[in-house]
Amino acid sequence: MSDIKYNNKWFKSGLEILNEVLYGKWKFIIIWNLIDKPLRFSDLRKNIPSITDRMLSLQLKELEEESFVERVVTEGNPPKIDYKLTDKAQGLIPALHALDTFGRELVLTKTTTQVQATKDTSLPLSEDQESFFDQL
């Protein structure tokens, strides 16, 4: 593969570019929350309770700068500000759904593996033996 130049930096792959542009704990989560509809800052804050106001503001600003999120101001008193995904961000949705599915499968696989490991660690008892718990 050939190197890719983006924002005056060279990258070995598209994944490196995404890591540069969408780096951070919250950016994918913010985009995920905006998939279905535009949301106000307070709605995003409610949907992502562990993010601080300052961090949400910073991440939204960076997503705006990279043209993944658009800030829409509706006139009024006070003005209403919504955040919505751009067409550029819409291209991420299939990949995010695939990652969501993969994450859910990891949990199922881990749970199944843990249950199987628990079953495997039980001591085999003959029919005439009782376990400690059976004696209680």
Image (cartoon, rainbow, N blue to C red):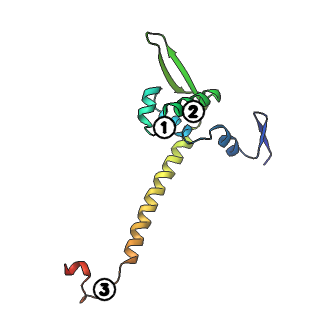
Q: In which quarter of the image is the C terminus?
A: bottom left
Image quadrant of residue 77?
top left
> In the rendering, at what x and y percent does residue 130 appear?
24, 84
| Residue at disc 3, secondary structure | loop
| Drawn side of residue 58 relative to residue 45, left or right | right
Q: Distance between the residues labelled 1 and 2?
A: 10 Å
Q: Name the residue under label 1.
A: 51
Residue wearing tag 2: 59
The residue located at (59%, 35%) in the rendering is 91
Residue at 48 percent across and 10 percent down: it is 75
Whether residue 40 is visible, yes or no, is: no
The amino acid marked with disc number 2 is Gln
Q: Decide: marks 1, 2 in contact (CB < 8 A)?
A: yes
Are there few (<14), some (14-19), or many (20+) residues within 10 Å of tag 3? Answer: few
**Helix, strand or loop status at disc 1:** loop
- Against 25, residue 116 (above or below) is below
Q: Which of marks 3 and 2 is nearer the N terminus?
A: 2
Where on the picture, by quarter, is residue 123? bottom left
Residue 101: x %, y % from top left: 49, 49
Residue 102, image x and y in percent? 51, 52
Q: Distance between the residues labelled 1 and 3?
A: 51 Å
Let me know if residue 97 appears in the view: yes
For marks 1 and 2, the one nearer the N-term is 1
Residue at 34% over, 84% down: 124
Which label belongs to residue 125? 3
